[in-house]
């Protein structure tokens, strides 16, 4: 009877540096400074790989584990774009191994206490836009290295206590600092404490009431809703317009758009006053 000593091992590295190792072998394996655990219940489907520039893809699935991959970490986005490597390895001699996949985690879904994650190969990055887009609106992300706005300033963010939450999407605040109406529309809500700590979402509507209270509505409900008394951080929103950059953020010198670019209709309009050869 013939036997095989080939096993599969995965390492997953989050953006914060946390690295976890898994294997389908029945005992732990160690190499490269990482221990690969067999008791997490992680499995992988067959890898689809191709020559050329096609995107390699596969999936991994497993049970949620309090000591490894928790549901709250998945929903908070801590595993988004995590770096993943997969080896075929000889468990009798771990120095004999072949790297068969390198990429990142893509879409993660959860159901019945388990998760399923799409794996994206290195060539997936070729799908991202390259170069600069000529457009009237700003191409920078609010607060990034190109924008340079300090989102932690008192005029652009606040951390109020939640008074009431409806459907994990509509937040009511009894007392609220003085901000103009709609100040936080298209901004971000980040849960600072409680069971939902770390969850974030984009703000759809920001309504200021005459009694000083405030209502914040999100585009999508948080998977773990905060409870009254939890603290959230609200960050001002930006619609990418040149006037908003100048008046709301006083940051027009760093505006990354082309506000004076002629509209598309101008290209089709008959031109007058042109010179004849």
Image (cartoon, rainbow, N blue to C red):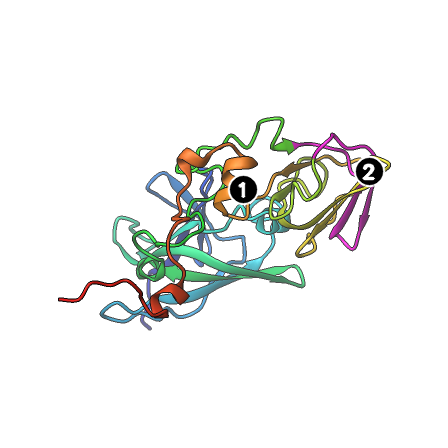
User: What residue is rendered at 70% in x and 55% in y?
Assistant: 221
Nearest-to-viewer mark from 1 and 2 = 1
Q: Position of residue 72 (x, y in %)?
A: 63, 47
19 and 91: which one is in front?
Answer: 19
Judge whether residue 87 can be spotted in this image. no
Judge whether residue 107 can be spotted in this image. yes
How far apart, in angstroms, are the residues tagged by discs 1 and 2? 25 Å
Task: Identify the disc placed on residue 202.
Answer: none
| 199 part of magenta stretch | no
Check the image and name the residue furthest to the right: 211
Secondary structure under badge 1?
Answer: helix
Q: Position of residue 122 (x, y in %)?
A: 32, 57
Magenta stretch?
Answer: 158-179
User: What residue is rendered at 51% in x and 30% in y?
Assistant: 150
User: Which badge, 1 or 2, comes first in the chain's sequence?
Assistant: 2
Q: Position of residue 271 (x, y in %)?
A: 31, 66
Secondary structure under badge 2?
Answer: loop
| 160 part of magenta stretch | yes
Task: Identify the disc placed on residue 244.
Answer: 1
Residue 1, picture quadrant: bottom left
User: What residue is rendered at 24% in x and 63% in y?
Assistant: 274
Label 2 sits on residue: 213
Check the image and name the residue furthest to the top: 154
């Amino acid at each position: 009877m013939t036997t095989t000593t080939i096993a599969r091992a995965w390492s997953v590295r989050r953006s914060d540096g946390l690295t976890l190792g898994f294997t389908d072998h029945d005992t732990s394996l160690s190499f490269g400074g990482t221990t690969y655990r067999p008791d997490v219940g992680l499995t992988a489907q067959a890898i689809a790989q191709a020559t050329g520039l096609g995107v390699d893809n596969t999936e991994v699935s497993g049970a949620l584990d309090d000591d490894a991959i928790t549901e709250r970490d998945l929903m908070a986005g801590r595993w988004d774009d995590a770096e993943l490597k997969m080896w075929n390895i000889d468990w009798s001699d771990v120095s004999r191994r072949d790297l068969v996949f390198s990429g990142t985690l893509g879409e993660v879904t959860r159901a019945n206490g388990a998760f399923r994650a799409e794996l994206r190969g290195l060539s997936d990055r070729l799908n991202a836009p390259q170069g600069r887009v000529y457009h009237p609106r700003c191409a920078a992300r609010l607060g990034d290295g190109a924008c340079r706005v300090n989102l932690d300033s008192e005029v652009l963010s606040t951390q109020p206590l939640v008074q009431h939450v409806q459907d994990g999407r509509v937040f009511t605040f009894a007392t609220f600092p003085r901000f103009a109406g709609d100040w936080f529309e298209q901004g971000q809500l980040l849960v600072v404490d409680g069971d939902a700590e770390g969850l974030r979402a984009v703000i759809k509507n920001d309504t200021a009431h005459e009694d000083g209270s405030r209502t914040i509505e999100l585009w999508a409900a948080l998977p773990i809703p905060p409870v009254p008394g939890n603290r959230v951080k609200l960050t001002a929103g930006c619609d990418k317009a040149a006037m908003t950059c100048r008046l709301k953020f006083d940051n027009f010198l760093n505006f990354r758009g082309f506000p004076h670019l002629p509209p598309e209709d101008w290209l089709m309009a008959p031109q007058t006053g042109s010179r004849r050869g």
